[in-house]
């Protein structure tokens, strides 16, 4: 006898199956239509750009689990077991339908391979689901929530998969085909039943299994299971081509299709919660809760029935108040399996909040007033902006006839904060030693607009951007070096098609080393650790240059903290937080300084004025005394160049 499979074995009134299948399909499609409706209304367009790179990324992340394996291998393997198990059974069911309704092909060897493949897929699914339940309810992984649907969905799927194996065992008990061993799980289970009992029980269990499976299909759009469709779409859209510079005008606070699909594709896995420095500091902001609140808000606004995920509803959190806790550090994006950038959504919400004048913290309002009045957040006169350069005999590029190859843009914080001015003075001296022909803008140096951009005051940002571009054009500036990663990021990523090239000072120093213009002398002995500024590291992927500079200094030993490079902890000063007083259980900067202390290093090096200020304040607050100190990388480089003993 040729190996084969009989559809609807022992089943009567098959028409009921078709009615149930039609009902399940209808409910599923109705849910999908609801999603598409909300996406269209909230984003204004369903246009999806084609991108080979995005397609490649989606394939690697969806089918090979590249992204879910990063950072949490156990969770990644669990997900892959469920994904490949579910996909195998879905493909198997589809092939069986083609075999039955269109043309016969699952016979002989093809049937044996088909049966074996379904067994493997079913086992993978069972193991993955059990593993998921163990992680959530026995190991109680902290980042995992335990809502009603978090139990119902996996148990539903577990029951459907297990009942499928039991059904197969019952059928093999009665049929006893010689090829039954290829269905190795069902074949093992077949020994548990008598032929008479199996034949009697089979129809009842078949209908129960059918209702479970069809019901599962029907509820996909109404539960977190929709990530089966939303996640791949979100991964693709996040990787598709986007404008280099986000829109700054009337649509800057609006959400695009990628945002809407990201909200619906979010699985609530909690990886962003683990990575978020605000959450880690015990503050009331959590990226996952913010994204879910955004999702519910869009559904309430754009769908008559509100949120269709009946098991996933949660009391609305204080979204508008809590969004000011975000430091826009990008840690959430580093770990999100669907590349969801919660911090970008926060930025868009801030734009709307500023436009509406609602829920803006008092100190942030005061900072914006200072920016409007003084063009800097330090409430300082522009006459003092270049005071840090007194005695250095630097070229002022705004003077008639002044020329230089490089413009050093010190930035607001480096110019006005006493503790940060050491960065500007040290860097200037290093450039002088290297023989670089550079100048500064002195009292005419503007604000780059970073703070206004981060807190959502786009009108002010536009004014500052235009003013900066006009100034650079007026004085023929084509090469710019910055102290602050925030200035660097703003120039590089949020100024459209500029006539100048911006580089952070770490890039300049590394290039000077490569050209042989910086030669370090011997005699320095110290163990240091390096803190990656968020806007230098995560945002702009500059991880190696600072470390290469440090390692090039004779006598300096670099030791890394537990969190470094893309996993670095935020100091708490970004996203406008430098000028706010938002309370948590502990300050982010204090968490970071303790981690630096634990390395045994004598010096904590950073490459950002905000980080320098925040970490130095934290050092004093937690009572860390000399010899431990916080330094900017420029200070270390200068001391190495002139063979100074490191002072403690």
Image (spheres, helix red, strand yellow):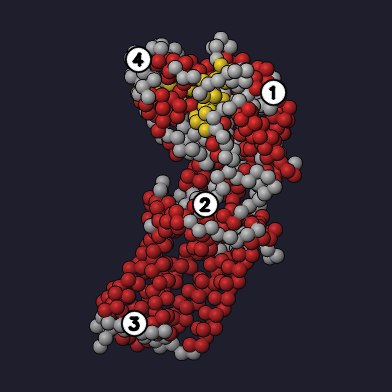
First in sequence: mark 1 vs mark 2: 2
Q: Residue at x 59, y 40 (%)?
A: 496
Q: Could you tell me if residue 5 is visible in this image?
A: yes
**Residue designated by label 4:** 521
Q: Residue at x 45, y 83 (%)?
A: 204
Q: Position of residue 331 (x, y in %)?
A: 50, 42
- Viewer-nearest residue: 643 or 122: 643
First in sequence: mark 4 vs mark 3: 3
Give the alpha-carbon distance from disc 2 to disc 3, as whole Å: 42 Å
First in sequence: mark 2 vs mark 3: 3
> Quarter of the image containing the N terminus?
bottom left
Q: Position of residue 522 (x, y in %)?
A: 33, 14
State which mark lies toward you, 4 or 3: 4
> From the viewer's perspective, is 583 left or right of 95?
right
**Residue designated by label 1:** 379
Checking the image for residue 448, the label placed there is none
Quarter of the image where one finds residue 149: bottom right
First in sequence: mark 3 vs mark 1: 3
Neighbours of disc 1 within 10 Å: few (<14), some (14-19), many (20+): some
Neighbours of disc 3 within 10 Å: few (<14), some (14-19), many (20+): some
Checking the image for residue 241, the label placed there is 2
First in sequence: mark 2 vs mark 4: 2
Give the alpha-carbon distance from disc 4 to disc 3, as whole Å: 77 Å
Neighbours of disc 2 within 10 Å: few (<14), some (14-19), many (20+): some
**Residue designated by label 3:** 105
Q: What is the total number of numbered labels drawn onto the structure image? A: 4
Neighbours of disc 4 within 10 Å: few (<14), some (14-19), many (20+): some
Q: Are marks 2 and 3 in contact (CB under 8 Å)?
A: no
Q: Secondary structure under badge 4? A: loop
């Amino acid at each position: 006898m040729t190996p084969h499979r009989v559809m609807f074995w022992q089943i009567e009134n098959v028409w009921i199956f078709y009615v149930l299948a039609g009902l399940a399909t209808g409910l599923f499609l109705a849910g999908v239509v609801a999603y598409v409706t909300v996406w269209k209304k909230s984003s204004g367009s369903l246009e999806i750009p084609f991108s080979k790179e995005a397609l490649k990324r989606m394939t690697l992340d969806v089918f090979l689990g590249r992204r879910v394996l990063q950072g949490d291998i156990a969770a990644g393997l669990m997900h892959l077991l469920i994904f490949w198990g579910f996909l195998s059974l879905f493909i198997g069911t589809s092939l069986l339908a083609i075999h039955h309704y269109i043309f016969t092909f699952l016979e002989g060897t093809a049937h044996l391979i088909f049966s074996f493949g379904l067994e493997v897929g079913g086992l993978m699914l069972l193991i993955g689901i059990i593993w998921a339940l163990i992680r959530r309810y026995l190991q109680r992984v902290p980042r995992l929530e335990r809502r009603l649907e978090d139990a119902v969905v996996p148990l539903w799927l577990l029951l459907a998969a297990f009942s499928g194996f039991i059904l197969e065992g019952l059928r093999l008990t009665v049929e006893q085909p010689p090829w039954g061993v290829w269905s190795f799980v069902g074949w093992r289970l077949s020994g548990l039943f008598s032929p008479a009992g199996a034949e009697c029980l089979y129809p009842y269990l078949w209908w129960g299994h059918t209702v479970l499976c069809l019901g599962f299909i029907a509820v996909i759009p109404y539960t977190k299971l929709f990530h089966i469709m939303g996640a791949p779409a979100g991964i693709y859209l996040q990787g598709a081509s986007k404008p280099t510079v986000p829109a700054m005008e009337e649509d800057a606070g609006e959400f695009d299709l990628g945002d809407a699909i990201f909200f619906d594709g979010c699985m609530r896995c909690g990886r962003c919660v683990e990575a978020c420095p605000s959450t880690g500091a015990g503050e009331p902001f959590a990226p996952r809760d913010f994204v879910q609140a955004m999702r519910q808000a869009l559904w309430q606004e754009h769908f008559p029935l509100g949120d269709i995920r009946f098991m996933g509803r949660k009391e609305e959190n204080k979204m508008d108040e809590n969004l000011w806790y975000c430091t826009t550090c990008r840690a959430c994006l580093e770990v999100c399996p669907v590349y969801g950038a919660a911090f970008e959504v926060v930025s868009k919400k801030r734009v709307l909040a500023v436009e509406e004048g609602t829920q803006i913290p008092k100190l942030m309002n005061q900072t914006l007033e200072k920016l409007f009045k003084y063009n800097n957040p330090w409430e300082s006169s522009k006459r003092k902006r270049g005071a840090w350069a007194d005695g250095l005999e630097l070229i002022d590029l705004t003077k008639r006839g002044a020329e230089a190859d490089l413009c050093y843009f010190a930035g607001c914080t480096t110019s006005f904060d006493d503790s940060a001015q050491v960065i500007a003075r040290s860097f200037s001296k290093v450039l002088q030693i290297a023989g670089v022909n550079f100048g500064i803008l002195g009292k005419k140096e503007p604000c780059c607009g970073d703070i206004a951009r981060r807190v959502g005051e786009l009108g002010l940002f536009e004014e500052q951007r235009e003013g900066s571009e006009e100034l650079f054009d007026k004085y023929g500036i084509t090469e710019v070096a910055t102290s602050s990663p925030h200035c660097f990021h703003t120039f590089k990523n949020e100024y459209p098609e500029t006539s100048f090239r911006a580089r952070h000072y770490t890039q300049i120093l590394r290039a000077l080393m490569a050209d042989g213009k910086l030669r370090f002398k011997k005699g320095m002995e110290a163990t240091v650790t390096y803190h990656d500024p968020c806007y230098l590291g995560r945002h702009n992927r500059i991880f190696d240059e600072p470390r290469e500079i440090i390692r090039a200094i004779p006598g300096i030993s670099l030791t890394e903290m537990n969190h470094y490079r893309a996993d670095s902890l935020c100091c708490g000063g970004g996203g406008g937080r430098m000028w706010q007083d938002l309370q948590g259980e502990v300050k982010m900067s204090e968490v970071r300084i303790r981690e630096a202390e634990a390395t045994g290093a004598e010096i904590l090096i950073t490459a950002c004025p905000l980080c320098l200020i925040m970490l130095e304040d934290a050092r004093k607050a937690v009572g860390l005394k000399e010899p431990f100190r916080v330094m900017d990388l420029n200070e270390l480089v200068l001391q190495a160049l002139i063979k100074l003993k490191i002072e403690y």
